[in-house]
Structure formats: structure tokens, C-alpha cells
Amino acid sequence: MVHKILKWAVILCGFFFFRIVSSCQSTQVQLYHNAQLAPKHVQAKQAQGRLGMVATAHPLASQTAIRVLDLGGNAVDAAVAASFMISVVRPQSTGLGGGGFMILHHARQGLNKVFDFRERAPQQATQNMYLDHAGQPKPFVWQGKTYKSSSVDGGLAVAVPGLVDGLLRVHEQHGKLPLAALMEDAIRVAREGFLVYSSLAKASARRAPILAAVDASRRLFYPQGRPLQVGERLVQRDLAVTLEMIRDQGRAGFYQGKVAQQLTQSVRKYGGVLTQQDLDSYHMKERQPLMGRFKGSTLVTMPPPSSGGVHILQMLGILSQFDLSADRPGAVETVHLTAEIMRHAYADRARYLGDPDFVYVPVQELLAPDYLQAIAAQISRARATPSHELVHPDIQIPQESRSTTHVSIVDREGNAVSTTQTINHSFGSGVVAQGTGVVLNNEMDDFSVKPGVPNGFGLVGSEANKVAARKTMLSSMSPTIVLDKKGAVDMVLGAPGGPRIITAVFQVIVNRLQFKMDLYRAVQSLRLHHQWLPDKLMFEQTLLSPQDQVALQNLGHTVVQDPWFVGDIQAIAREGGRWVSVSDMRSEGVALAQ
Ligand code: GLY
């Protein structure tokens, strides 16, 4: 009881601190303010402490991570617990049917490790599997009705899930507490339910057609013939049983036996090609972290098959070529330069990035000082470069989602975990495997499915990211840890948001390390985004005044105020001898301290 009172005291203190901080805005920096999120559900957007720290995209996930740290668990234990919980409470974003990346900093050993448990293409996947006889993208058709592209909706969109294998193996290698202790809260919440919140309800409305079409999805996420409603209780009994099977049988509880059978049968029922052999052969990969330096700090970030780490380092490297002494955040000159740097990075992303186990990804070349200088030399501070001048000949178009979620954790020993996890689009493929509660991903859509056809986000890719059996699709997920000059953790961060992940993480790092903002401001400052194609400088809310917009248009930019500016950064940093954790105002997340 005392423990519970203390925990709520911490949450309330965090909340009041956040209210104070958010009321004293800087004259230079415009902060995001989301009135809808205040104060009904006690939003603790910032917390401070000296022991363990947590930032996740849902209060229950943050609370379970803190509970695990209180029990003596380490950062890995807390991250595993938060991941299972977030699979339950953000079924639109992530889950057992998805995958992700994790970066671990082990303080005592000074080690950085990267775990890739992203989904992979099934063995029966082929390059043209999403095209009809005329070479056009084919839709998913079910019971005579036509849905979205077959790489987005239905069974064919489903790649081999990796999350469970990844979490279990990372826990085996680096966890301290028994798995059962880490999964207890998630199992209880799956069984007893939790209250539906706004973005979950909206996601179920957005994905209503496919959710209503698939039997097991309809029962969960389209009850009584309508989308979920805010405030109603979402109970996932089948998911609770699946979690118990994983708790009791480990990997076999998911990749073999009854659950595995239901996964493959459901995928195949809705047109997919997932087999038991695919599940048997799935194993997480450990990769070398991608390391780089900026302003005296060392960044430990995600290598391919993520494009995130490469392009965050590339953008920081190009930025470092400029004299920024007169720049200030949000000023026209700075926005222009930032957009130009993003434009160049995304043109390279489109051309070169893919699964390094299948294609050569020229990471060292893209980050070579000569190359970064050459790009910087092409950037004029007085004129925007039209994107078509950077067009490469062999473009293809992958789609990416606005879903996904991120968890940042630091424990009392200074170990840190940064993990981003996803099922791709909201509710993934829309297929819940019968009797399991598992929402299956549509990660196959992150491949370049068809050359030359712009998607909703206008992202472009190349041969490097074409579909092939057992290949990993390109990702933008960018879990990152920043180390100080002594090699200790200084910052842990990441975000959802498809292509906007990379620019969001980049801007938070620049805000903090270049513009010396505290973490709260660095996260809540309004952001911009440019991804080469479409050739648009997208900006959030009031980042640009009408005069600034005209000034940028005069430089040659097409400026667009974009209502969708996801980011949902979850971050932790060391400030003034203590830790601060911050959860983005753009979503429902909560920052807590132990
Ligand atoms: N599915 C989004 C990403 O991996 O970038």
C-alpha cells in the first residue's frame, strides 16, 4: 500500500513539474502543446531521479518497468517487461506478431550490443508477389470484397514475427529476474483489460474495413459492429493465454505447438504464405552497433537493415561541416539548412539502403568525411536544391507506417536499453491469429514492392530493398544511445513514425548537443521533416510564421504545414548530475523515475 502511495506521489510530482515546465516557454523555442492529453489521465511527461529511469508510450508499460527495477531487475528486465506490456496495451503499434531492434549499453563492461529481431520475409516470398499479371500492385480480396494492397492488408502482408524470439533471447543473455516476474503484469492486463484511449480508438476506426473483415480481429477491435470507443475496456483473454504459453514454454510456446499452428493457419486462410518452417528457422541476429561522433559525444545507433543510424550519423556529419554560430532553432536559415541536409540523406537512403545480409550497403562510404564534405559543398545556404536534381535512376517505392513504439530505460547501474518495436501499420496486416490474440504484422510492406509508384508517404527505395525469401525489409527505426566523453550513458532515445523517426531523433540530438537545450525542450520543440520526395518541407504547428514561410518559399522550398507530426520520442538524459526522462507530448506516453 505504502509502495503504491509513493508511486502515485512520484507520478503526481512528475505531472506538476511538467505543468510548471510547460508554462515557462523559451522565447526562441516553440514547444509542442497537446491540450487533449492534459491532465485527465495524469500525464507525467517528465521525471527526474538518480536511480532507474523509464520512458514509454503507455503509462502501464512505464509502471511495469519501474516495478521490475524496484524488484532488483536491470535495464534489460525492465525493457522486456515494458515490451510485453506494450504489446498488450498498444495492439495498434506493436505486439507478439511483430518485431524490432534493441540497443543495450552494458555499463560495467563498457559494451554496446545491437539485437535485430525484425521480421523477415517467409521462404515462399518472391520479388513480384504483390503484383498482378499486368505488373500492377494487387489488392487483398476477401469474400468478394477488395481491401488495400496485398502488402498492407491480409495474410500475404505478414512477415515472420521476431519479437518473441528477440525478447526471450536478450533476456536469457542479459536479464536477472525470472521471465515469469517480468510477464506477470502484461498477462494480468491482457486478461482483465485496460481502458481504450484516444489514439487506439482512432486507429481502430482508421483500420475498420480490414478489422471488420477478419473474424478474430472483428471480435477484439471491432466489437458490436463498430470501432473501439474511448473509455471502454479492452479484454484480450486469448492473448493472456498466449503470453502464459511463452512464460511457461519459452520460445516453443510461440514458435511451435498450438500457437504456431494458429499463426500459420490464420495467415494462410487470409491468403498468406507463412509456414511452420518459417517459424522454426526464425532467429534473432546480433549485429555490430553503428558508432559515430558529434560534438564530442559518441552515438551508438542502429546499423542496416535500419536506415536510421546511417542517416542520423550522415545528417550530423553534414551539419558539422557548417558554421552554426549564428544559427538558432526555428530560424529560417536553420530550417533551410536542416531541410537541405535531410533531402540529401533521404536521396541516399532511397538508393543504397537494404538488408546487408543480401545486398552491399555502403555504410562506410556514406559516412566517409570526404563524402560528407562533398554533400555539404553542394548545399547552398541561399537556395533550395530541387529534389529532382538529386534523383537517382533506379528508384522504387517502399511504404512505411506511422505506427510503432519506443521504450527507453536506464537502471541504477547505468546500463541502458533503447528499443523500437513495431507491427508496421496500425494493427499490422489486420489479421489476428484465431484463438491467440496475436495481431500479425504487415512488415512486408516495408520492402520496395513495385518500382516507380509513389506511396502515401512518397518514400523511395531501390533494388537494394526488393522482396526476397528470408530477407529483412528496410526499416527507419532508430533506437540510439549517446555516450559522454567518458563512455557513460548521456542520452537514450528513439521514436515511432516511419520515415519521420530518423528526422525526429536527429532533431532531438541536435537540439540537445548543438543548441544546448535541456531534454524536455529538445523533445517538445516543434519539428520539421523533409524526405527528398515528395519535395516538401513539412513543418509542425506554428514552427514557421507566415513571414518565415514566405522567406523559405523565396529560397525555393515548398512549405507545408502538416497536421501529422508523429514522433512520440521516449528519451532519458543525464542533466546536472541526475537523470531526466521525457515522454513526448505528442502521444499518451509517461516518463517515470524509480
Ligand atoms: N515499419 C516501420 C519501420 O520499420 O521503419
Image (cartoon, grey):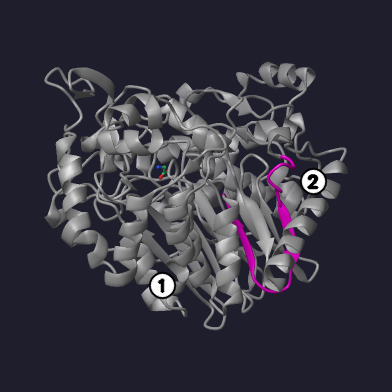
x, y percent for residue 339: 61, 33
Q: Is residue 301 above or below residue 529?
A: below
x, y percent for residue 98: 35, 50
Queried whether the magenta region covers residue 182, the answer comes back as no
Q: Which residues are magenta?
A: 38-57
Q: Quadrant of residue 29?
A: top right
Count the numbered circles shown.
2
The amino acid at mark 1 is: Ala
Point 17% across, 38% down: residue? 272
x, y percent for residue 461: 35, 35
- Residue 180 has which mark? 1
Judged by its main secondary structure, the magenta piece is loop
Q: Helix or strand or loop: what does disc 2 sit on?
A: loop
Residue nearest the viewer, comparing 383 with 480: 480
Point 41% across, 50% down: residue? 306
Q: Which residue is mark 2?
A: 325
x, y percent for residue 158: 26, 42
User: Which one is closest to the eye, mark 2 or mark 1?
Assistant: 1
Task: Dividing the image into four quarters, tell me where ligand 1 lies.
Answer: top left
